Image (cartoon, grey):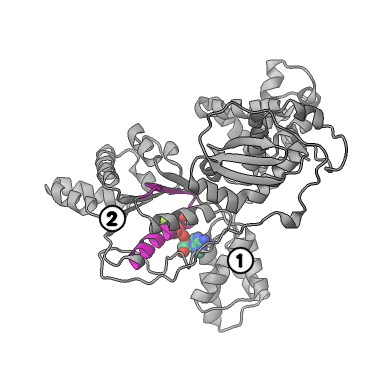
Amino acid sequence: MMWPVVSPDRAFSPCRRWLVSMNTHELWEAVLGEMELKVSKAHFTTWFQKTFVSEYRSGEVVIGVPNTITQQWLSKKHHRDILETIQNITNQAVRSLTYRIESRSTAPQPLVLEEKKPAIPQEQIEDYGFVSVGINAETGGSGTITVNPSYTFQTFVVGKQNELAHAAAQAVAAQPGGTYNPLFIYGGVGLGKTHLLHGIANEMRRRNPSVRILYVTCERFTNDFINAIRSGKGKEFKDRYRNVDLLLIDDIQFITGKEGTQEEFFHTFNALHQDQKQIVISSDRPPKSIASLEKRLQSRLEWGMLVDVGLPDLETRIAILGRKCIEKAFPLDREILHYVASNIYSNVRELEGALNKIIAVHQFRNIQPTLDTIKPVIASFESENVRKTVTPRQLISIVSEYFDITIDDILGKSREKKLAFPRQIIMYLMREEMKTSYPAIGGELGGRDHTTAMHAYGKIADLLKTDEKLQKDLELIKQKLYAG
Ligand code: ADP
Ligand code: MG
């Protein structure tokens, strides 16, 4: 359990006393603490960063948001979650929840509570589904772009882990050079970054066949640049890269260490951005984690919109597999799709690879696929790094052992540094690795306050940025956690 949740018709709840002194700022902090657990980091930063409770009056809540996009996104995607979280924390019915564009100017207001209002019945809470628009992509024109016509928004299966990236990519294709410039998409291999980049190109081309698009890998950009310098064709290079409406650079992480290329990219970026031409970039990590990336370039890359693509969940993997089967005209039973998607979860590319192998094996032997015939094919594909599920108890025990202290000491009252630091590491790992809520973390560690857990998380996260010894320690602890 996270916060004390008590049925609203109970006259007195344990959290009421605490609530009396709560203000809008503290309420929102608590709501954000819960929302952070429910959405990805990029998502959280993008949509919740500049929000606050502007008014809380007798169950009528107004959330301040920085712009229309945030207003729409929150009301469409997170309305119910926000509403329920506020109700749980305040133990008060929320009668209306609205989002107003404003910047935070007023000091936090005390909550104006009202007693004994029944909570809104579930069915009256409006549930907006976010409509993702499927578009029939066609490739048109005889442009010079080397874009894969089958990588469209329509062939991209949307799940929780990529919906933000997908939505941002669609927004960019509909309104290039607007708010999301540059669009920076990052995530591990085989998770659909290139697909989305091509999707934007295909969609922009569909809307306007004369649009000028240039898609390159970082490697190609680098080679082009080096060749241009060598052959004295700097002007041609500039003409090529700066006279476009959309520039897509795939896998920008390879720019690390190439100073001349970074310099040139910086100028290309500025020229395009100034002309409100759209720039879309993909990478396997966020800008600040790209080693030896010039600071000024890093900040440029963070100007627009940063979105991540994560590992799709089982349902999404099944849907992706189903879609690929249709594309390849090789139908498989749902039972088989389920089996393949449950056993292959490292990335989509591998999933597709497994499907290709299944197709090849079955076509070659000219047999109908059944669970029995596909199992041996899948066996060779099974991902090696299976993550064990770890319980809070196991975590506490592993960290205690690592620092050579007893579990009783960890859970005890002493604040000696020798004990406090491992305790903070445990709190950090519970949050980071297990997505445990702060109150629950406090509970696991001998009934400590949730603010202690929040503080510990912040402190370790901060230290980790610079402290190499700590980085190493955590690496080893994680290995112990997940090994064997
Ligand atoms: P990345 O560039 O992130 O390494 P890709 O875009 O090359 O990954 O994707 C690898 C393969 O997986 C491609 O064939 C792509 O079409 C497919 N793929 C990835 N994500 C999805 C998705 N959500 N829906 C459909 N296909 C996907
Ligand atoms: Mg790629």
- Asked whether residue 429 appears in the rendered view, the answer is no
Q: Give the numbered dot on residue 451.
A: none
In the rendered structure, does residue 192 fall within the stretch colored magenta? yes
Camera-nearest residue between 290 and 272: 272
Left of 238 or right of it: where is 160?
right
Picture coordinates of residue 305, whole percent (x, y): 44, 45
In the rendered structure, does residue 127 fall within the stretch colored magenta? no
Q: Which residues are magenta?
A: 178-206
Camera-nearest residue between 278 and 144: 278
Left of 410 or right of it: where is 333?
left
- Looking at the picture, which amino acid does disc 2 mark? Asp
Q: Residue furthest right?
A: 11
Helix, strand or loop under label 1? helix
The residue to which callout 1 is attached is 318
Please name the residue shown 69% across and 18% down the image: 418
Does residue 38 sit above or below 156 in this rendering? above
Local crowd at mark 2 within 10 Å, few (<14), some, or many (≥20)? many
Left of 197 or right of it: where is 371?
right
Camera-nearest residue between 343 and 305: 305
The residue to which callout 2 is attached is 245
Mark 2 and ligand 2: say if the CB distance to the nearest ligand atom is below 8 Å. Answer: no
Q: Residue furthest bottom?
A: 366
Camera-nearest residue between 255 and 313: 313
Does residue 125 sit above or below 156 in this rendering? above
Left of 141 or right of it: where is 90?
right
Q: Are marks 2 and 1 in contact (CB under 8 Å)?
A: no
Picture coordinates of residue 12, whole percent (x, y): 87, 34
Please name the residue shown 25% across and 55% down the image: 244
Picture coordinates of residue 443, whole percent (x, y): 78, 32
